[in-house]
């Protein structure tokens, strides 16, 4: 009985992530939905930690995790992104499909690749984190975020860039592998410290800037290890 419960604990957190994503869609409110998606990210981290700590990783758990991520970090952000359309013309709904397609393909490709200490391409939670940051910037009155997202060309361009990063061959470092070497830990530490500083200084912009920094540092790290 204890053993069976122990193996199901990570999946319970995964399903909570899934429910958070569905709740975000049902709420259809940029503020509350953003909170639900961030809560989903918390459960997404916890399920992986629980699986590793309890040593109960499984193929079923990996598939459940991908389905939950698709809803919480693909479908929900894509749907909510349509609330930012600069006008009601039909073609402004198309960029949201790039978010959905990019995250779906990214998750499918991730499942087919062997396990590594790094990511190939921008992880789906990271691209969702960027989009959630835009929602928060809009909701809390960031003039900069409102101005750029209100520009039709940028509104269209953001999902396209995120999809290209999702499907790129860029080597991205993983926060799950902090103990690999000193250089790796340094890049992760810089990212975390910078994010905390940005959040304190200007939380309205901290999330998109953190993802941009993550991409830049990953690119620098990739170039460094290839030399």
Image (cartoon, rainbow, N blue to C red):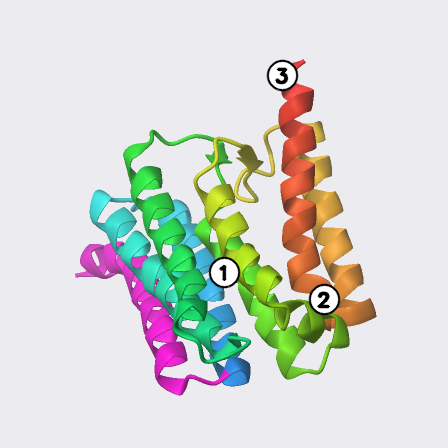
Rendered position, 25 above or below 58: below
Q: Which residues are magenta?
A: 1-29
Task: Decide if residue 58 is in sight here.
Answer: yes
Q: Quadrant of the C terminus?
A: top right
Please tell me which of labels 3 and 1 falls first in the chain: 1
Local secondary structure at mark 3:
helix
Alpha-carbon span between mark 2 and mark 1: 14 Å
Horizontal relation, residue 196 to residue 8: left or right? right
Rendered position, 100 above or below 28: above
The residue furthest top is 227
Q: Position of residue 200 (x, y in %)?
A: 79, 69
Q: Which residue matches tag 3?
A: 226
Can you tell which quarter of the image residue 199 is in?
bottom right
Q: Which residue matches tag 2?
A: 205
Rendered position, 31 above or below 153: below
> Badges 3 and 1: C-beta atoms under 8 Å apart?
no
Instruction: Name the one closer to the observer, 56 or 223.
Output: 223
Q: Which residue matches tag 1?
A: 128
Q: Position of residue 20 (x, y in %)?
A: 38, 74
- Confirm whether the magenta stretch covers residue 176: no
Horizontal relation, residue 223 to residue 99: left or right? right
Local secondary structure at mark 2:
helix
């Amino acid at each position: 009985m204890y053993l069976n419960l122990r193996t199901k604990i990570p999946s319970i957190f995964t399903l909570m992530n899934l429910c958070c994503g569905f709740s975000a869609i049902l709420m259809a409110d940029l503020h509350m939905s953003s909170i639900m998606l961030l809560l989903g990210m918390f459960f997404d981290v916890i399920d992986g930690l629980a699986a590793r700590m309890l040593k109960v990783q499984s193929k079923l758990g990996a598939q459940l995790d991908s389905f939950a991520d698709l809803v919480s970090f693909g479908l929900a952000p894509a749907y909510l992104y349509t609330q930012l359309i600069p006008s009601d013309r039909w073609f402004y709904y198309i960029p949201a499909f790039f978010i959905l397609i990019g995250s779906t393909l990214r998750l499918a490709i991730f499942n087919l690749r062997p396990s590594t200490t790094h990511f190939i391409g921008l992880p789906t939670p990271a691209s969702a984190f960027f989009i959630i940051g835009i929602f928060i910037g809009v909701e809390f009155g960031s003039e900069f975020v409102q101005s750029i997202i209100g520009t039709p060309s940028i509104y269209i361009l953001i999902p396209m860039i995120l999809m290209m990063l999702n499907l790129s061959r860029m080597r991205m470092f993983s926060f799950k592998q902090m103990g690999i070497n000193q250089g790796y830990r340094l890049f992760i530490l810089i990212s975390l410290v910078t994010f905390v500083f940005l959040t304190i200084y200007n939380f309205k912009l901290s999330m998109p800037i953190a993802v941009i920094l993550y991409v830049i540092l990953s690119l620098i790290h990739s170039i460094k290890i290839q030399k």
